[in-house]
Amino acid sequence: MIDFDRVTFRYAERTILDDVSLDVPEGEFCLLVGTTGAGKSTLLRCVNGLVPHFTGGTMTGEITVAGRSVRSSSPADLADAVGYVAQDPLAGFVTDDVELELAYTAEQLGLRQAAMRKRVTEIVDLLGLSDVRGRALAALSSGQRQRVAIGAALVAGPAALVLDEPTSALDPGAADEVLSALHRLVHDLGVTVLLAEHRLERVVQYADSALLLQGGKVTAGSLGEVLGDSPVAPPVVRLGELAGWAGPPVTIRQARRTASGLRERLAGRAPAAAAERTGPALLEASGVTVDYPGVRAVDGIDLTAARGERIAVMGRNGSGKSSLLWALQGTGRRSAGSVSIEGGDPAALKPGRRRSLAGLVPAEPADLLYAETVAGECEGADRDGDAPAGTCAKILADLVDGIDDRTHPRDLSEGQRLALALAVTLTAAPPLLLLDEPTRGLDYPGKDALAARLRKLAEAGHCVIVSTHDVEFVAEFASRVALLSDGQVVADGPARGIVSASPMFAPQVEKILPGWLTVDEVAAALGGADDGAE
Amino acid sequence: MKTAVSRAAHHGAHPVAWWGWALLLATAASRTANPWLLLLVVAVSGLVVTWCRGDEPWSGAYRVFLLIGAAAIAVRMVFYVVFGGADGATVLFELPSVQLPEWAAGFRLGGAVSAEGALAAAYDGLRLATLLVCVGAANALASPRRLLRSVPAALYEVSVAVVVALSVAPQLVESVARIRRARALRGNVSRSPANLMRTVVVPVLHDALDRSLALAAAMASRGYGRASDIPAAARRATSAFLLTGMLGLCAGAYALLGSATPAPVAWSLLACGAGAAVFGIAFASRRVPRTRYRADVFGGRDWAVLLSGAAAVAGTVLSGIAEPGTLWPATSPLAVPPLPLYAACGVLIAAAPALLAPNTSTKAGPR
């Protein structure tokens, strides 16, 4: 259905796709895997001709979709053959109303009104959007928006659907909504789906096959084969490799069936409890409330934290995580309640003093960066924070190495840009460090590196608070979890206790081996066991 | 069909009906200088706006136009005091006066300020303010998006551009707020223009550019700008008609306003221009391959809204015949102006949309 024949794509001097041949058969749900910056988005955009029609670059080879040559048509001409769903649905909406958005492609194709109504109604029913049919797009939840974007791409009845990270920005519940809708499309309509995603643990169970893009080359195969060799793999695959399971299993269900042996080996052991050394109390917040017109985002939250703690604030999208972080830092709105960091209220201070008490890395780290080069950014941060020259550059070098000083901050990879924003924030040496959704756009190695960095900062005496709905990252990083719902804390305690008790927020390893959170914990315990046996 | 009806009820009257109603009300206001009548028009438009407007971003436009109207009255008064106008017997105060020389058009600056002149200027300013308020009411009541959906298919590209611009504006506001908050996180509170340029304007523009590229890619992959099978000759003919029509309209309007051209020539120029433009649009619309998902139907209620506006105009016409002098009350000698009854009744009828098409939408939706 989607056919690449010896496709090579070069942008300036960089080869992004190198002699790629692949064939996604009809009705297949195919997963595209690769590290950040491997060129997954480029490959996806080749399918409907956005690359190179829209981006420029040099392409050789032949791509056909449903028998139509992509080379000789524009993306608009292919709208009835390929549906393309970009990462941020809001950025691609043309109208402001659910029904009109769904009908947009059909209007462009010149469908008759009666046919259009029928088609829109079918899509609404298929994707479970009947409750929100007459609503404005701005009033939808993030999962509903993503489903509208998928529906809008489907209205023209394309044979193939291409999705670029459809669930990266979604909480686990909303991601399930979207993925089960996709599952239904593949099974009921026979649509061919090609999907790229960083959070593999969410999508693997729905996919039939996988493609690995690495160094411009594509390897195709079954999920187990491809993920076993991939530098990015969900925890369940890494656990399988560790335990030497054949396959390896890619879903929780498969892994549980083969896990009895491993469970026996681990019987009587417990995860090595890291000695939690928490320092003196740092943050005391009580009754923090944030009101926006018509909404109470944060509803009287009490939170105390000490130096050395690693806290994850979890909850669904819109549960008030970001608002809480901004209110704690003092720059965001706080309608009621009190916050005290080392005895001072950050909201009462000037921004310059405030950031030396609490530093916040926003969800869009690029917002903190203005300079043309990394070196310029570091010098600016030293000036802003009245720090000795070279402070920021030194912090950055500690966090991540191999960044070229002359690079433009926007040209860095997601992980590097986050590290730069973190270095800029740390230049003011705040004891309290807050990060808003830092894992968006990071692959597994990137997330591991971030968790390690943050753990090191906590050991150095910072208190680190992260808002996230990335379950696997929380398992790697957090010592304590606060669960938010509708602006209130519904649970607060040690990470292990909270996530293992929650069906939605439990990491994959926990689901296979109750009581264990990460592959590294299991590896350490097994390593210890083997040493003991010898 | 049921959805269409319930949606219409939810969305209020047709935007064309609202514009028609507001322009008819403005016509009625332009036919009089009677302050009672003008204030009544303002009151009626205010009533209808409060009852019928939705909760969209443009719904606040009415208040802005009220302020502009008040400013218009103030400016008119200042002009009267400085440049003079109608004279009268009751002199309020005397300003030092300067007679400008002949080459400066011989204006008189300052001089006597009379109560009669001031009153006439106030009536005049009020009339202008009322016209502005009527336009404001139309802006607050009619959704620009729905109005654009009613434009002929040939103007589709233009309407898409406007719709996109309308959705970009709120995003831009949101992006400025986000970037300013991030700037506070850096401890940057400098207000120097160079610093603001670098730390606010450039990132916001960067954001806007990224967003427009994303939107363009999304529109392209959803079929916008598909190759259509309109022959090139037909496309060129349409453009030629539209261009000629516009030129004709401009020339006709110019000739009509100037006094050098005889009226019949001016009118025929205008008519030819309008004809060419209408033909061009109609010709092009027939060949457009796109379709509309749901055309806004101009229903009975919309006609009723239009008729209520027409009643206001009819009232002023009746008053002009039956009660001459009440529409343009004399200011010299000073007197309390009479209320023209027919016109007042007409304007009151124009308040009917408050009952015909009240806003029933609720602010709903999960967050």
Image (cartoon, rainbow, N blue to C red):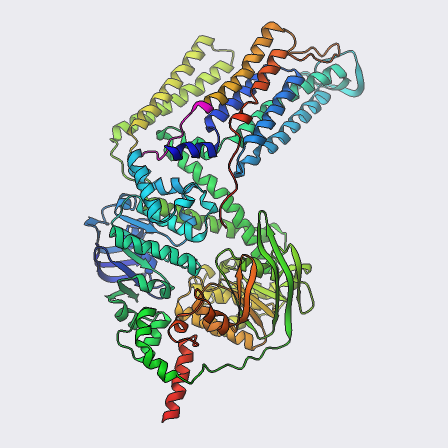
Q: In this view, does B3 lie to the left or right of B310?
A: left
Indicate whether A268 appears above or below A215. below
Foreground pick, B175 / A409:
B175
Look at the image and tell me whether residue B271 can be seen.
Answer: yes
Residue B92 in the magenta stretch? The answer is no
Residue B60 percent location from the top left of the image:
57, 36
Horizontal side, residue B217 vs residue A20: left or right? right
Residue depicted at 27% across the width and 36% down the height = B228
Residue B312 percent coordinates (x, y): 56, 16
Q: Where is residue A358 in the image (x, y as percent from the top left)?
A: 61, 65
Q: In the rendered view of the protein, which quadrant contains the N terminus of chain A?
A: bottom left
**Residue A45 showing in the rendered view:** no
Q: Residue furthest bottom?
A: A534
Write down the region rendered in magenta: B290-302
- Where in the figure is residue A95, as x and y percent of width and height? 42, 41
Residue B74 is drawn in which quadrant? top right
Please state if A104 lies on the left or on the right of B206 as rendered: left
Q: In which quarter of the image is residue A93?
A: top left
